[in-house]
Amino acid sequence: MKDDIYNNLKLDLPELKEGVLLKDYTTFKIGGLAKYFFIAHSKEILIKVIKLAKTNKIPIFVLGGGSNLLISDKGFKGLVIKLKVKSYKVNKNKIVVDAGVGLSKLVNLVLENSLTGMDWAAGIPGSTCGAIYGNAQAFGEKISDNLMEVEYLDVKSLKIKKVSKKQCKFTLKNSIFKKNKNLIVLSATFDLKKGNINEIRKNVLEHINYRKKNHPINFPSAGSVFVNTETKITNKKLLAKFPELKYFNSKGVIPSGYLIEKVGLSGKQIGGAKFSDVHANFIVNTGNAKAQDVLKLIKLAKKKVKKIFNINLETEIQIL
């Protein structure tokens, strides 16, 4: 019986909740109910919760900062664990942060200690674990650039392990953690360099102001929807019609927002979801968007970009 499982879990997990609306835990503000919901404040309790879920054969999903994520309108028929492990330690040039530490907090730590290497992340929502999971990047810099090692939990063995930056196998918006859902990031160690605090503060403010101007921050979103395409276009007709492609070819990366804009989808709206007029690689929630609205826009963009540019757009946001 459903109630029996819930009641049995409650004996070991008094703070376990039932029927929690997940849209309240995402930056998209979209998502149905979680059958079970638990906030884990320590690594030990996280392991305990996962062990209980496995024993009771309950599917689990570990939630970080809730950005870069689209949750189904039907919710999740299992246990959602909100990771809220937030301790950190600074030792000279090294910073060790738990996975639940937000990127904004990490940027503040860097600033407070006159360290460089994380200025680019100023203004990005979400947690450190999510940033490592998808190898977050901006302004030509990546979360992996100054990363030394990652501590993670293997859900299958319930053992905590550590891997070096190299072993994380980072690529464009990807990592072993994104490819293997059984690996949960617990903490990360960064090796940074000392810098001039005034220069660092200036960079942080510039990046925040850039995002305010060029990103649709007035509406809920999950961030960039598609990964920028690492390819070159050689079709002469396309190069003549879209001369900007020559510049992108020289860089080896074509912005997905550019492709979406050029196929005429900037501002396109389905239901409550809309491709932003400010930045076409953002789908925004105009008020009451459903996951299905977003998925229809994603499907439409993939179809049109494939037809006109012969490029297969890769979805960056995680879909639950």
Image (tube, rainbow, N blue to C red):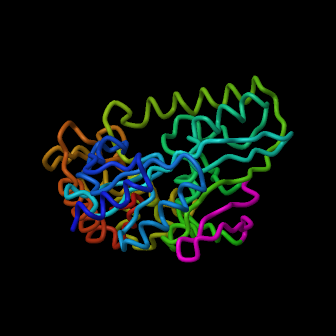
Q: Residue at x 33, y 48 (%)?
A: 17
Q: Residue at x 59, y 42 (%)?
A: 101
For the question of whether residue 89 can be seen, the reply is: yes
Q: Which residues are magenta?
A: 146-166
Determine whether 218 is above or below 185 in the image: above
Q: Position of residue 68 (x, y in %)?
A: 42, 52
Q: Quadrant of the C terminus?
A: bottom left
Apparent side of residue 96 relative to residue 14 in the rendered image (left or right): right
Determine whether 115 is above or below 271 in the image: above
Q: Position of residue 234 (x, y in %)?
A: 45, 73
Viewer-side residue, 232 vs 284:
284
Viewer-side residue, 127 vs 53:
53
Q: Main secondary structure of the magenta part?
A: strand
Residue 230 belongs to magenta span: no
Q: Quadrant of the N terminus?
A: bottom left
Q: Residue at x 78, y 36 (%)?
A: 115
Q: Position of residue 189 (x, y in %)?
A: 74, 52
For the question of whether residue 243 can be seen, the reply is: no
Q: Quadrant of residue 259?
A: bottom left
Residue placed furthest toward the left: 271
Residue placed furthest toward the top: 198
Apparent side of residue 288 relative to residue 97 in the rendered image (left or right): left
Residue 161 belongs to magenta span: yes
Q: Position of residue 274 (x, y in %)?
A: 23, 45
Determine whether 51 is above or below 36 in the image: below
Apparent side of residue 152 relative to residue 147 in the rendered image (left or right): left
Q: Disc count in the image?
A: 0
